[in-house]
Image: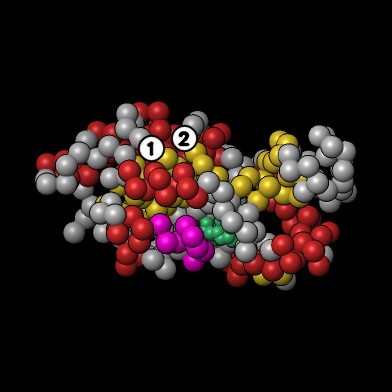
């Protein structure tokens, strides 16, 4: 049965007040940023997983820093698309609680105007000093080992969460899920935990769940409802429904 937010309001679901939205690479795909698992998922013949680990950084720091320098440079040339813009509109218009938890390390949600955004996998636009633990806004390359503006050590790395590292702000995310009435997952393959497990956590707590993705994700069976197609079409349509209900 197609998902209808309006029907919930009239049915026995009660009012929806608190919304948690999870976004992944698929929401930025139409802005021209490659997803991780599409198109072979290779970068210069390396599997993305092989350059996104602390072990890879220890083994070949130049390779890893070059990979992230390239992606940092690329995202600065991209623009938000109608899906980011629709979520920003929801953020400013929704009176209840709302949290956009993004796995993306680009800043397209913020550039579209969204405020209630949490970057659980970090951000390309910070450098993190492993000597003094300070994070600094960063737009340039790191491969030349520039000194940390805070302590002067040449120990900067991208402020992104690699495989095997703990995503940021998990307690805040689970707290928001506990309070949520609706969980929506947009543009994510459901391949990477812990984010891939949010739908099950949400369901276990009685939260309604909706997937908006190009194709059924690996976790699609866990959602109450799913719509498949391009984020630039599905998200604005869904936001219109929510804001007019
Ligand atoms: N509209 C909607 N969905 C799309 C679109 C689009 N235009 N294009 C692609 N998708 C979907 C794909 O079908 C896929 O299911 O987006 C999903 C992207 O999946 P991944 O590439 O696996 O990205 P993501 O789920 O964000 O990856 C999770 O893995 O590599 C790590 O840390 C990295 O945050 C990343 C995490």
Vertical arrangement, residue 203 with respect to residue 156, above or below: below
Q: Residues within 10 Å of mark 2 (few under 14, many from 20)?
A: some
Q: Residue at x 87, y 46 (%)?
A: 154
Q: Residue at x 40, y 28 (%)?
A: 92
Q: Nearer the viewer, residue 7 or 145?
A: 145
Q: Residue at x 32, y 64 (%)?
A: 222
How far apart marks 2 and 1 lie (CA) works out to 7 Å
Q: Is residue 222 left or right of residue 80?
A: left
Residue matched to label 1: 98
Q: Residue at x 42, y 40 (%)?
A: 99
Return the x and y of residue 202 as percentages of the image width and height.
Answer: 33, 55
Could you tell me if residue 42 is visible in this image? Answer: no
Q: Nearer the viewer, residue 20 or 38?
A: 20
Image quadrant for the N terminus? bottom left
Q: Residues within 10 Å of mark 1 (few under 14, many from 20)?
A: many
Vertical arrangement, residue 50 with respect to residue 184, above or below: below
What are the residue bounds of the magenta stretch?
191-199
Count of numbered tags: 2
Return the x and y of residue 205 as percentages of the image width and height.
Answer: 29, 54
Image quadrant for the C terminus? top left
Residue matched to label 2: 116
Q: Is residue 35 left or right of residue 221?
A: right
Could you tell me if residue 91 is visible in this image? Answer: yes
Vertical arrangement, residue 148 with respect to residue 227, above or below: above
Under circle 2, the secondary element is loop
Q: Is there a contact, CB below 8 Å, between mark 2 and mark 1? A: yes
Is 34 within the magenta? no
Under circle 1, the secondary element is strand
């Amino acid at each position: 049965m197609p998902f209808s937010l309006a029907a919930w309001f009239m049915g026995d679901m009660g009012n929806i007040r608190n919304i948690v939205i999870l976004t992944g690479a698929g929401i930025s795909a139409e802005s021209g940023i490659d997803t991780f698992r599409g198109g072979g998922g290779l970068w210069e013949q390396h599997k993305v997983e092989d350059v996104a680990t602390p072990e890879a950084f220890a083994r070949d720091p130049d390779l890893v820093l070059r990979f992230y320098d390239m992606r940092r440079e690329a995202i600065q040339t991209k623009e938000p698309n109608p899906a980011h813009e629709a979520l920003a509109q929801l953020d400013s218009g929704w009176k209840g609680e709302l949290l956009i938890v993004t796995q993306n390390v680009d800043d397209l949600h913020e550039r579209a105007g969204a405020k209630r955004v949490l970057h659980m996998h970090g951000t390309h636009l910070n450098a993190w000093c492993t000597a003094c633990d300070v994070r600094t806004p960063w737009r340039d390359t790191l491969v030349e080992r520039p000194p940390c503006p805070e302590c002067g050590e040449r120990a900067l790395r991208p402020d992104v969460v690699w495989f095997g590292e703990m995503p940021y702000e998990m307690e805040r995310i689970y707290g928001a899920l506990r309070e949520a009435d609706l969980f929506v997952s947009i543009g994510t393959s459901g391949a990477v935990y812990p984010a891939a497990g949010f739908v099950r956590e949400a369901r276990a707590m009685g939260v309604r769940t909706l997937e908006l993705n190009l194709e059924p994700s690996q976790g699609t069976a866990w959602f109450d409802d799913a719509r498949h197609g391009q984020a630039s079409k599905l998200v604005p349509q869904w936001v219109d429904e929510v804001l007019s209900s």
